[in-house]
Image: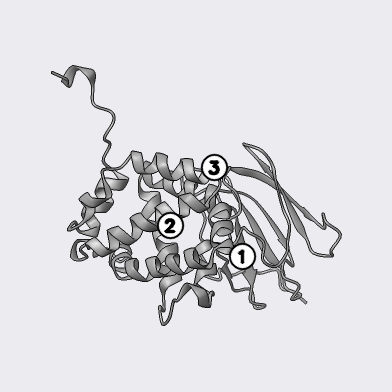
Amino acid sequence: NPAGVFSNSGQAIDNVNSADVTLIDLNGDGDLDAFIATGDGDVRSWSNLIWLNDGDGYGQVTGQCLGDSETRALALGDLDGDGDPDAYAANIGPDRVWLNEVGEECSCVTAWLLGEPAAGLRNLTGTLDTFYALRDQVLPQTRRGRHFARVYDRHNAAVFSALLADPALRSEAGTLLQTWQPNLELLVSGQGQSATITSVQVQRLRNFLNHLGAAGNADLQQMIAFELAQLPPLSRFTGMTMAEAQHMVLETRYRYLPVMWHR
């Protein structure tokens, strides 16, 4: 019989200011998992989280990107008649219905690429942890960074669709991840000052964004064009350290000069 005495498991789930949570078996292994509603857009991102139980009360958060609006309440049940629990998310913006199925386009693009042979990624241990640390630790530090986290959530499915339809673009994305991996590892570990951005990294980023924009839907194209317009020319980043680039992209404002300063 349970003793009714609780102890702290020591787990710190990757989220803050959760608005709601539902415990239910999400993956059919007989263990209770958690669907967690993110209720504060000022931290991390607006994506809800899935925590899968290993069966002993310990588990891990998956890389799925579930939504781009603050969720305030959840209800889970079988909505499509396939026997799996689905989710209805009541949001500040439009509500969302998330169907529980294999291969759904809400998977994290980076996580999916790492499992794709066509992406050409080999022996990049820790790659996924690095990109999650960028999203969950580096970006939330500033208002601009939180904006990029929300952009990531909002357009994740469109990027996924474009990569899924084009093996060449998928391979290019894998090469891009591989090219930037060493710099990003140093950035997320607090050593961004020792990582210098090369012309090859900048050129591959520019080429990929151009190709992704051409392959994506209208919203994705507009987003890429708009976000690039807010930054200096990409060529300016060549020779910068990652720390300098972080400051320029996430903290420096270029458009808010008081009129009185103009001569």
**Which quarter shows the N terminus?**
bottom right
Could you say whether the residue bearing mark 2 is in a helix, strand or loop? helix
Ranked by sequence position, the earlier of labels 1 and 2 is 1
Residue at mark 2: 135
Can you give x and y, in whole percent of width and height, for residue 137 in the image?
39, 57
Q: Is residue 13 visible?
A: no
Q: Earlier in the sequence, mark 3 or mark 1?
A: 1
For the residue pair 181 and 87, the one nearer the viewer reads as 181
Labelled disc at residue 51: 1
Residue at 67% across / 77% down in the picture?
55
Spatial CA span between label 1 and label 2: 17 Å
Kindly identify the amino acid type of the residue bearing the numbered disc 2. Arg
* Residue sitting nearer the eye, 226 or 29: 226
The answer to whether mark 3 and mark 2 are in CB contact below 8 A is no
Identity of the residue furthest to the right in this view: 81
Q: Residue at x 40, y 50 (%)?
A: 140
